[in-house]
Amino acid sequence: MRGGYLERGYMKNLFEYENKYGHMGPVAGTDEAGRGPLAGPVVCACVIMPLELDKLIDGVDDSKKLTPAKREMLYDKIIKAAVSYGISVIDREVIDEINILNATKLGMKEAYEKMQIKPAVLLTDAVKVNVPVLQQNIIHGDSLSYNIAAASILAKVTRDNIMRGYAKQYPQYNFEQHKGYGTPQHIEKLKQYGKCPIHRETFIKNFIS
């Protein structure tokens, strides 16, 4: 069903761009998790979700608005329902080498390239991606597009799981709690123990010598 997707309740604003471009073919959304942290990778996802009424997933929204348990539940549903998806992890070494914006663009490009089915239109959260497809850049896209919201959930859950793994490897930093973001607790631990291999050199210069 094209041109008349679900518009009800909290989801009513998520289909403007899907409705606008749906007649051109599959519409994908891409988003990232982890641009701001002091440690760990940036994770990008790209996904084409089915838009038939009976295949829409209730609860899909900007991942930042959801509880961890809700994100985990939706992640599984999105993976099972997706027409096609790709997820890319860009490690801190690359972030330090090419900067976080370029690392994010690279991750989105890699996520797009991993998709078995390519979209006719790519919706992005205000980031231009170097891929050969029509793009619509949307500010706050994860709150305005169903596909971008789904991508944000895939990226966030993937990154959180990675950071929980690092928490076991470097337990002194409590990565399981703050996921590498610059919380007071994390900064205190950073000053106490110094950096570890997943800390972004270009992000921590103001906190340790």
Image (cartoon, rainbow, N blue to C red):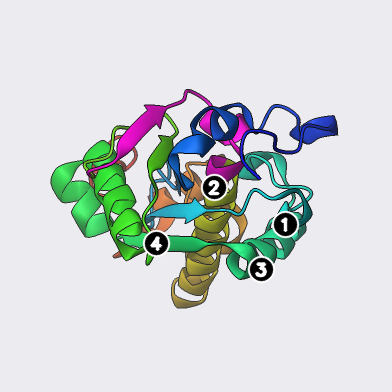
Q: Position of residue 32 (x, y in %)?
A: 44, 46
Q: Which residue is mark 4?
A: 117
Q: Amino acid at mark 2?
A: Ser
Q: Which residue is mark 2?
A: 152
Comes first in the chain, label 2 or label 4:
4
Asked whether residue 13 appears in the rendered view, the answer is yes
Comes first in the chain, label 4 or label 3:
3
Q: Which residue is mark 3?
A: 76
Q: Amino acid at mark 3?
A: Asp
Q: Position of residue 93 (x, y in %)?
A: 21, 58
Q: Amino acid at mark 1?
A: Lys
| Residue 20 disc label | none
Disc 3 element = helix
Q: Amino acid at mark 4?
A: Ile
Disc 1 element = helix
Which span is picked out in magenta?
132-148
Classify 129 as above or below 168.
Answer: above
